[in-house]
Image (tube, helix red, strand yellow):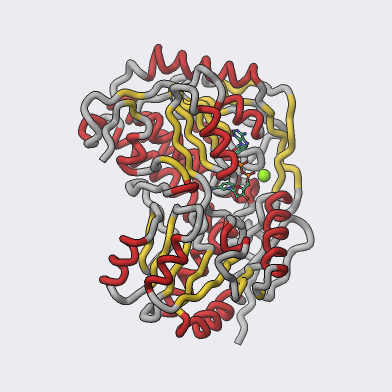
């Protein structure tokens, strides 16, 4: 029997998008010089014009952040700082529908995800760090910790508001002021967040938001008035940043790419594992640094898992991100769609077998059907490089040791998944895997209290929890 779904569109009347935006500097919106369009990737509709910050704007933002740090924020007690963070968190909750709709329009992710994951987690991040602001000396990070000063923060387009929260909340809790740059294709929720800062009466200059592209990001990275750089994005740009800050006294954290192994052992609960595989790679169109993009199946259950996976994938609802029933939305940009198309073409030419879920893709916008590649080997590019799309590479293994060897055979080390009925096997495997975050019998679970970060080319440092907090404190002792 097949069920038809009636359309269940979320209304966009809750948001008002301006025709043009400026930067948020020193507590005020200031007009930009040059502008570039931001579009809805599901329709290619131009939503607004975003300002491109050059040297003058970045300078002004850094100056405003420095002034706020020396005159206000560094003099304020942790208890007072905490009050502002609580206030921001509450306003984000009050305006959560507005944030969710805006995020979905600008990014292309399903409203179900922005409403139920991105925005609640972003608010949770502010609540969590609000609690730390007056307890820093009890965080187990040493008693003589001090804020760095001005933090420069550069974030990607896959979780725009959530990545802002991961950056801004710990920075402010630890007593830093910030200059943040959202990604060029997804600036709108950061600009709405600037309004929230005004509404919360956050002292002017504590949070500054400049919009722009990589050139604006580079100006932040190289600015001598910045004490700490925090970046999330591609490994390629992460390496550029590491090089740029190496000769300086700037402190730096980098959250980069991943190619996570999701390992299913023969004793796993198969139906649950199939749900976990789907969540692991198709959540947020696969635009997830910790996505379970390499599926490792024990050989004797591979056929059964793949059969069930295909049945499940055929039920994924692809289409209008504003429809509450949609599971998989639009690819964030034309560039990203091109990258996915090119990398998957190498999957075909290198000899893996492609299978895509039968689904109708909208005529306008950027779309990619949920896809798996079977018969992938370790040397294939689709087994080694981050595709950052709804594409899963499937490999098999015979023994648990072979699973570990294959899982660790990657330049990355951000996350991993283990599916098994045996607690002892889970503990053994997680002790062998070189990955910062390991999920067992689940995948893509996030919580502000738990540290997130990777080994090798996945980055430097941790975000979230006490570990993440320590990155925003000078003299913090690490364990
Ligand atoms: P990107 O690394 O270029 O962009 C991330 C942020 O860095 C953006 O705000 C961008 O404006 C800024 N940026 C770019 N060049 C910069 C520079 N030289 N200095 C300072 N900031 C700079 O990532 P992009 O081009 O959007 O995506 C390319 C690939 O990177 C994706 O296909 C994906 O594989 C990976 N990626 C990984 C992410 C993750 O969370 N691990 C997030 C975004 C992309
Ligand atoms: Mg956009």
- Name the spot of residue 344 as percent of width and height, x first: 68, 63
- Name the spot of residue 191 as percent of width and height, x first: 58, 33
Q: Residue at x 74, y 55 (%)?
A: 365
Left or right side of 159 for 428 = left
The answer to whether residue 464 shows anywhere in this view is yes
Quick check: which quadrant has ligand 1? top right
Q: Which of the 4 image quadrants contains residue 167?
A: top left
Q: Residue at x 50, y 53 (%)?
A: 411
Q: Residue at x 58, y 74 (%)?
A: 313
Total marks placed: 0
Determine the residue located farthest toward the right in the rendered image.
363
- Name the spot of residue 96 as percent of width and height, x first: 49, 46
Left or right side of 423 for 247 = right
The answer to whether residue 356 shows anywhere in this view is no
Determine the residue located farthest toward the bottom in the rendered image.
1
The quadrant of the rendering that contains the C terminus is top left
The quadrant of the rendering that contains the N terminus is bottom right
Q: Is residue 3 above or below residue 403?
A: below
Q: Is residue 41 above or below residue 433?
A: above
- Name the spot of residue 383 as percent of width and height, x first: 57, 63
Frontmost residue, 27 versus 380: 380
Q: Residue at x 70, y 63 (%)?
A: 346
């Amino acid at each position: 029997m097949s069920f038809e779904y009636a359309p269940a569109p979320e209304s966009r009347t809750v948001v008002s998008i301006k025709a043009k935006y400026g930067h948020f500097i020193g507590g005020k919106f200031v007009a930009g010089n040059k502008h570039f369009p931001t579009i809805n990737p599901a329709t290619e509709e131009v939503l607004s014009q975003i300002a491109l910050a050059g040297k003058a704007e970045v300078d002004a933002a850094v100056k405003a952040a420095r002034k706020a740090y020396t005159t206000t924020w560094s003099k304020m007690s942790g208890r007072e700082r905490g009050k502002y963070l609580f206030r921001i968190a509450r306003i984000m909750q009050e305006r959560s529908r507005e944030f969710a709709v805006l995020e979905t329009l600008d990014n292309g992710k399903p409203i179900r995800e922005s409403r139920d994951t991105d925005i609640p987690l972003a608010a949770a991040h502010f609540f969590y760090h609000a609690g730390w602001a007056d307890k820093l000396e009890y965080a187990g990070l040493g008693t003589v910790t001090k804020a760095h000063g001005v933090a420069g923060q550069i974030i990607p387009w896959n979780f725009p508001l959530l990545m802002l929260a991961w950056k801004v909340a710990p920075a402010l809790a630890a007593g830093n002021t910030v200059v943040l740059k959202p990604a060029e294709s997804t600036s709108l929720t950061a600009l709405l967040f600037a309004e929230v800062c005004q509404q919360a009466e956050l002292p002017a200059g504590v949070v500054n938001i400049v919009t722009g592209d990589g050139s604006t990001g580079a100006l932040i990275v190289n600015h001598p008035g910045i004490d700490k750089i925090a970046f999330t994005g591609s490994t390629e740009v992460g390496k550029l940043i590491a090089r740029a800050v190496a000769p300086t006294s700037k402190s730096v954290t980098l959250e980069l790419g991943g190619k996570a192994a999701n390992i299913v052992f023969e004793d796993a609960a198969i139906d649950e594992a199939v749900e976990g595989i789907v969540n692991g790679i198709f959540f947020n169109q696969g635009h997830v640094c910790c996505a379970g993009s390499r599926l490792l199946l024990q050989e004797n259950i591979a056929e059964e898992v793949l059969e069930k996976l295909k049945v499940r994938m055929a039920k994924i609802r692809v289409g209008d991100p504003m429809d509450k029933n949609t599971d998989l939305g639009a690819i964030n940009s034309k560039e990203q769609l091109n990258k996915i198309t090119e990398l998957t073409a190498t999957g075909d030419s290198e000899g893996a077998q492609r299978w895509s879920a039968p689904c109708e893709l909208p005529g306008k916008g950027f779309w990619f059907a949920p896809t798996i590649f079977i018969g992938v080997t370790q040397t294939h590019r689709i087994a080694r490089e981050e595709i950052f799309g709804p594409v899963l590479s499937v490999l098999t293994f015979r023994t648990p040791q072979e699973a570990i060897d294959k899982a660790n055979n990657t330049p990355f080390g951000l996350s991993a998944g283990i599916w098994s009925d045996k607690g002892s096997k889970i503990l053994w495997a997680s002790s062998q895997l070189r990955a910062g975050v390991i999920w067992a019998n689940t995948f893509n679970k996030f919580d502000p209290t738990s540290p997130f970060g990777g080994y090798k080319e996945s980055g430097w440092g941790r975000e979230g929890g006490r570990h993440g907090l320590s990155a925003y404190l000078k003299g913090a002792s690490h364990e």
